[in-house]
Image (cartoon, rainbow, N blue to C red):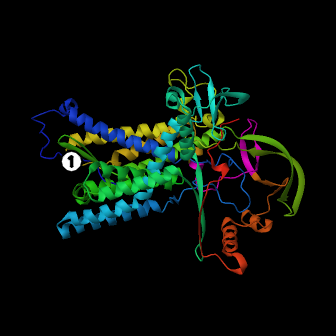
């Protein structure tokens, strides 16, 4: 729901133009603090959520080659990709919910009944999002407390090895020299005093192992299938923290807890929902742009529901006698497009790393004049993508490798940290557009002294900044072609290059030294005898049903701690 930004003054009214100037608000400390709190909070959750949504772009190769039938790494695909039809469905669904809530409030004459229902419902559905937010926050704190790399007072880089419980000297890019152990203290830099004794160091290593280890959880239920996943200690703590937050909110009217649920919903939405491409994202934003204007300016629905309901469908900020509210839709809807812009930046980063190597291959194609299938040997260029390096969860390491009191980033860093540094042109442009939009919204609030449809100003700010940036950089075509539906996520593609070494035509996929342009992609898997991940999984589930002595398993639950699920070793 795209709620408006409004600032109802509890017990107060706006002064008339004859009594005061609009400038007086900028001399009011409470007003400035209130709006600063709103701006920082919204930009902060979008910034963090956008970075959490990062994953392997289609211009990068998987970090490790998957076997036939093996599913992609967890989190590599979005749960929900939007389609152009959603530009029509979203406003209709939002309007139906909004009008329904409005008339329910009018009919019941007591919004507390609806408030209780929505609060309980939102408390339950927001648990998963809060688990993600809390666990990622704890993972970030773990990386700050126990980094993989850190720089000592002597300016030299050190690498931590959890398996041997040692800290070793290494060069600027993380290469360790033999017999270079300098310490057995797991605490970095100025935190080294925490490991003064042998007992304290052992405790530190044990805590580090607990916080960085991944356990493999497997569940099998007869007739339902088999599932497995990786769990960290932060997920367990995050789950209990999320449940505690939801229960506490259900029994209180705390604005802080309501906002925390709202932050969790926004954070989870950024990781689950993708606009798929810029066209779909622009269409959805424009449709909700019209919806927001109509509902705020021409109906009583939006303002009534936003101000009457006390539920985590909005963020509420209070300072002294003043308060401001911002609907979650005004964060999530523009936010998923801003997150798309950040992933597009990462896509462009890996596009610049693509190389084209000349390959001798057999090309099978149809003769355009006779229609006969012709096989010939030619030299063509094969597209070679750089392997993807996970860019998430390295903020703590990036902090500790900095020089001069954490102020300057070194010129050379280990590959896992170097991968986190890429140009974020479109992300910064869209964030600036969002910031300008929210500032204009607040100014219009002062001018008209009534709730404003935030998307009226946010949508032009975000979309205008993105498409203008693409126009100025000459990358509008790249923006138009970029999609996250998997269609451009290809490997071993053979292309023709122009005189500048840029691809101009895609010929086909190379397999065993042959490019068959007559074979349809849809039939390739069937002809090769390759099974889909779903078929492979079904066979595994069927095999898992078999038990000892001809029986079958009914219920199996296991938790394993394999050696290779300790955190990744530093680059070597």
Q: 394 or 245: which is nearer to us?
A: 245
Residue under the image location 49 percent in, 53 percent down: 235
- Within the magenta stretch, is there residue 20? no
Instruction: Relative to 490, say whether 444 is above or below.
Output: above
| Left or right: 104 in relation to 267 | left
- Within the magenta stretch, is there residue 490? yes
| Left or right: 79 in relation to 15 | right
Q: How many marks?
A: 1
Q: In the rendered image, which quarter is residue 109 located in?
A: bottom left
Q: Give coordinates of residue 422: x percent, y percent.
A: 58, 35
Instruction: Relative to 26, say whether 466 is above or below.
Output: below
Instruction: Relative to 320, say whether 270 is above or below.
Output: below
Q: In the rendered image, which quarter is residue 485 located in?
A: bottom right
The residue segment tinted magenta is 480-506
Secondary structure beneath label 1 = loop
Q: 420 or 103: which is nearer to us?
A: 420
Q: In the rendered image, which quarter is residue 182 located in?
A: top right
Residue under the image location 35 percent in, 60 percent down: 123
Mark 1 sits on what residue? 450
Instruction: Relative to 360, say whether 127 is above or below.
Output: below
Quadrant housing the N terminus: bottom left
Q: 16 or 133: which is nearer to us?
A: 133
């Amino acid at each position: 729901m795209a709620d408006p930004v409004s600032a109802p003054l509890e017990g107060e009214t706006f002064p008339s133009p004859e009594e005061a100037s609009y400038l007086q608000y900028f001399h009011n400390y409470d007003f400035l603090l209130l709006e600063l709190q709103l701006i920082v909070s919204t930009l902060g959750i979008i910034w963090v959520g956008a970075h959490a949504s990062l994953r392997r772009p289609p211009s990068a190769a998987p970090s490790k080659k998957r076997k036939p039938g093996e599913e992609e790494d967890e989190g590599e695909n979005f749960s929900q990709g939007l389609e152009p039809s959603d530009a029509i469905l979203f406003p209709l669904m939002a309007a139906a919910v909004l009008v329904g809530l409005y008339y329910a409030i009018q009919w019941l004459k007591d919004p507390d009944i609806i408030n209780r229902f929505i609060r309980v419902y939102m408390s339950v559905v927001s648990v998963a999002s809060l688990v993600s937010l809390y666990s990622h926050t704890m993972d970030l704190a773990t990386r700050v407390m126990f980094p993989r790399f850190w720089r000592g007072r002597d300016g030299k880089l050190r690498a931590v090895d959890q398996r041997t419980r040692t800290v070793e000297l290494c060069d600027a890019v993380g290469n360790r020299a033999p017999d270079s152990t300098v310490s057995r203290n797991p605490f970095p830099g100025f935190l080294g005093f925490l490991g003064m004794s042998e007992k304290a160091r052992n405790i530190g290593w044990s805590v580090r192992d607990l916080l960085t280890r991944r356990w493999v959880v497997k569940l099998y239920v007869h007739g339902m299938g088999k599932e497995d996943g990786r769990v960290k200690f932060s997920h367990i703590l995050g789950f209990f923290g999320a449940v505690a937050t939801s229960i506490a909110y259900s029994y209180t009217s705390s604005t802080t807890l309501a906002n925390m649920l709202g932050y969790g919903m926004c954070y989870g939405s950024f990781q689950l929902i993708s606009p798929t491409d810029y066209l779909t994202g622009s269409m959805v934003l424009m449709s909700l742009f019209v919806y927001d204007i109509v509902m705020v300016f021409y109906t009583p629905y939006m303002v009534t529901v936003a101000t009457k309901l006390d539920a985590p469908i909005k963020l509420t900020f209070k300072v002294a006698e003043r308060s401001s509210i911002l609907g979650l839709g005004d964060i999530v809807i523009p936010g998923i497009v801003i997150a798309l812009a950040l992933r597009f930046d990462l896509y462009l980063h890996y596009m610049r790393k693509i190389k084209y190597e000349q390959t001798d291959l057999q090309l099978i194609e149809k003769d355009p004049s006779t229609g006969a299938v012709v096989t010939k040997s030619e030299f063509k260029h094969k597209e070679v993508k750089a392997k993807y390096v996970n860019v998430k969860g390295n903020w703590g390491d990036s902090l500790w490798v900095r020089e001069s009191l954490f102020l300057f980033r070194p010129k050379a860093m280990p590959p896992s940290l170097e991968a986190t540094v890429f140009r974020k042109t479109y992300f910064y442009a869209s964030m600036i557009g969002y910031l300008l939009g929210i500032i204009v919204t607040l100014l219009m609030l002062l001018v008209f002294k009534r709730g404003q449809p935030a998307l009226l100003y946010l949508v032009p700010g975000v979309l205008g900044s993105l498409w203008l940036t693409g126009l100025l950089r000459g990358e509008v075509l790249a923006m138009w072609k970029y999609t996250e539906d998997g269609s451009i996520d290809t490997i071993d593609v053979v292309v023709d290059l122009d005189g500048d070494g840029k691809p101009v035509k895609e010929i086909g996929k190379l397999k065993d030294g042959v490019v068959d342009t007559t074979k349809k992609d849809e039939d390739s898997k069937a002809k090769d005898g390759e099974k889909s991940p779903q078929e492979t999984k079904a066979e595994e589930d069927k095999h898992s049903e078999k038990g000892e002595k001809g029986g079958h398993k009914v219920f199996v639950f296991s938790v394993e701690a394999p050696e290779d699920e300790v955190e990744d070793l530093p680059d070597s």
